[in-house]
Amino acid sequence: MIRIEEQNRLFELIGKTIERDIDALVVGGSAMLYYNFSKISTKDIDIVLLNEKDRNYLIEVIQGMGFKMKIKPEKRGHPYVLESEEYVLDIFAGKMFRLDISEGILERVKERVEYGNLTVCVISPEDIILSKSMTDRFRDREDVIEITKEANIDWDSVLKECKWQAKNGDFRFCVYLYDFLDELVHDYSLKIPKDTERTIKKLYRDFLNNIKTKK
Amino acid sequence: MDWRKTAKEAEGLHTVKSLAKSMGIKKSTAVLYIHEMRKGGYVRTMRGRKGKRLYDISPLSLRKVGSDGFIEILNRNSSLKIQRPFKQRVYGKKLTIEEALVRALKSDEPRIVLASLGLFKKPLDWKRIYRLAKKEGLEREIGSMYELSRRCFKVRRMDGRIRRKLRDSPIRKGFIIRRVRRSDFGDIEEMWGMRIPFRKSEIEELG
């Protein structure tokens, strides 16, 4: 398991090695480490580069540091997975699974940490929830419950981003989010404001109606 | 008692009185709550009008990673404050005032550049400034900003050799802030070959 100190050490090493300025977003569990959540370690470090060019350069540098390529992505939005003895690094570019990196996500960034030439942006808890909602891992569900228990979530931001993603990214985004939250409400007794629940349900139904109309 | 839960319920900006009212407790109990929540890192104290204590309560805070970024240094040292939606930190080294000054100039944002004028009031290491300015190709910018600050408030004198080196720089960008020019400081513009983007009144507010 990787703790914040180890993650910082790795980012510092990368920042010293790269020769030009690169901005990256830390997402998922790695982003949670920057907050005072109960979670203090993560299995892998997830970072999202803003474009493919930066990702290719970073991968080249990281491989030079002794990391081995474990998985190459087959689809856009999937990560390159690189591994060393201590770390597992998931590197995305512009998109994390079904979540596109939007202007909204960049505007909601809570902290920018400079590690030499590498600047790491920490996404907001609302966007951590969105990034975790697009996976099927059990651990991600527990993390989202932890976030909602320990912080006051701005559900309006979540909805706004969901609408943006459905319009500009993956048009099925609201369906995935609805399924994810519905599961959490029933299995983990997650409490969401009634308005939010209604709106997301409406988005979900609208999506289904649209499909039926098209057929 | 779970103080994070209490902080979650009480999230927002409070005085002791408003916290007591919103939670339905006595003022003395509110003081105790603030004390306990502060231990957990959920409370930040600020001063309001007439020095009144304001408590910013939030269950969520960012762990301190590294040291302050250049915006925080500007805010600490300049009377003009910059508000950003995100915090800036630097890991692995501590930024000096000189580095903050050069980064502020590099940002090309009017309010940040104006706030950076306040840094000239602090004792600066001119050699270090020259080294950093040369690295970034900002010699004339630094020189003209120094001249500007000397006109409007009390500033320590720059080493003559450094000043000459700054003025003799071959790099002439012409503008401190791209395509912004005011006409209050024609002589400085002529001396340094730089367009000054501020009015005299704007700078005097910093004093």
Image (cartoon, rainbow, N blue to C red):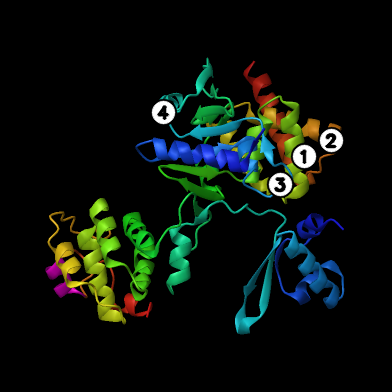
- Crowdedness of circle 3 by 10 Å Cα count: few (<14), some, many (20+)? some
The residue to which callout 4 is attached is A61
Which residue is identified by label 2?
A188
Q: CA distance from mark 3 to mark 1?
A: 11 Å
Indicate the secondary structure of the residue bearing disc 4: helix
Marking on residue A145: 1
Q: Along the polypeptide, which appears first: circle 4 or circle 3?
A: 3
Label 4, label 3: how far apart the Cα atoms are: 31 Å
For disc 3, the marked residue is A37
Front-most of residues B37 and B188: B37
**SS of the residue under disc 2:** helix
Q: Chain of mark 3?
A: A
| Closer to us: B117 or B40 | B40
| Residue at image point 72% right, 51% down | A152
Dots 4 and 2 on the same chain: yes
Does residue B81 appear in the picture of this structure? no
Where disc 3 sits, the SS reads loop
Quadrant of the drawing holding the N terminus of chain B: bottom right
Q: x and y percent of residue A46 in the render? A: 57, 32
Task: Please state which of the two labelled residues, at mark 3 or mark 2, is closer to the viewer.
Answer: 3
Looking at the rendering, the stretch of residues picked out in magenta corresponds to B185-193
Camera-side residue of A86 and B139: A86
**Residue B180 position by quadrant:** bottom left
Q: Is residue B154 left or right of residue A179?
A: left
Three-letter code, disc 2:
Tyr
Q: Is residue B190 magenta?
A: yes
N-terminal of the pair, mark 1 or mark 2, is 1
Q: Position of residue B42 (x, y in %)?
A: 71, 60
Could you tell me residue B107's position as x and y percent? 35, 55
